[in-house]
């Protein structure tokens, strides 16, 4: 209010009773009052509002820079974690390859052992079979010799006409007959 009273006093003093109308130029008192009001407003803004704006801008800048810093830090941590993951994955792949190689060599060893055992078992079975065949051949030969001897003894008893029941005589006759058969058999063929 004091300003408007001062402005009206200035207007009254400047006026000399003649009114000259200048439509585009304001009165001098209005220019002075406007300039004083502008300076007061500028002072108030500079004293109170401008520091608050600066403080808000600094806080926002700090928050943005802190966010960027945190993002860079998180990105660096993620890169380190990725490197560790890739190293662990490479180690796991190498370990898996070593395990596969070991399993393949173990499999080959087991197959070779099984083959060796099977060959040994087959050889043992073959040896036993050969021994059994030889024993059966010898038993058959012995049985055949006894049967041939009995038949020869019966035949000799009929031919000679005398009884060959005497064991010693019969045995000598049978042995002589078998000896003749062996000499008559072709070479290399067992009787």
Image (cartoon, rainbow, N blue to C red):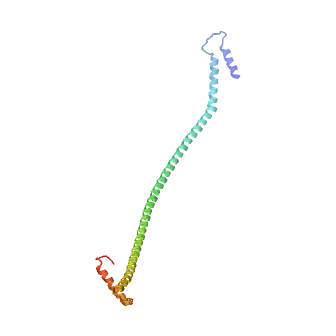
Q: Quadrant of residue 134?
A: bottom left
Camera-nearest residue between 114 and 184: 184
Report which quarter residue 138 is drawn in: bottom left
Residue 191, given in percent of the width and then of the height, sits at 33, 78
Q: Is residue 165 above or below residue 57?
A: below
Q: Where is residue 18, by image quadrant?
A: top right
From what the image shows, is residue 157 above or below residue 22? below
Residue drawn where x is 32% and y is 84% of the image: 177
Q: Is residue 140 above or below residue 47?
A: below
Give whichever of 61, 184 is nearer the camera: 184
Q: Nearer the viewer, residue 86 or 115?
A: 115
* Residue 71 can be seen in this image: yes
**6 lies above or below 151:** above
Percent position of residue 187, x then y: 28, 77
Which residue is rendered at x = 54% and y = 41% of the image? Answer: 68
Q: Position of residue 166 (x, y in %)?
A: 38, 90
């Amino acid at each position: 209010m004091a300003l408007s009273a001062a402005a009206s006093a200035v207007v009254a003093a400047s006026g000399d009773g003649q009114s000259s109308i200048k439509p585009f130029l304001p009165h001098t008192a209005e220019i002075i009052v406007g300039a004083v009001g502008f300076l007061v407003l500028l002072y108030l803004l500079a004293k109170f509002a401008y520091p608050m704006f600066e403080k808000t801008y600094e806080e926002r800048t700090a928050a943005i820079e802190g966010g960027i810093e945190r993002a860079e830090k998180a990105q660096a941590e993620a890169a380190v974690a990725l490197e560790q993951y890739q190293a662990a994955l490479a180690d796991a792949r190498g370990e898996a390859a070593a395990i596969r190689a070991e399993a393949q060599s173990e499999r080959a060893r087991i197959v070779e052992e099984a083959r060796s055992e099977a060959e040994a078992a087959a050889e043992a079975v073959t040896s036993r079979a050969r021994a059994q065949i030889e024993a059966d051949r010898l038993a058959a030969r012995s049985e055949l010799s006894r049967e041939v001897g009995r038949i020869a003894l019966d035949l000799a008893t009929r031919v000679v006409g005398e009884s060959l029941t005497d064991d010693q005589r019969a045995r000598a006759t049978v042995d002589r007959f078998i000896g003749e058969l062996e000499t008559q058999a072709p070479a290399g063929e067992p009787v």
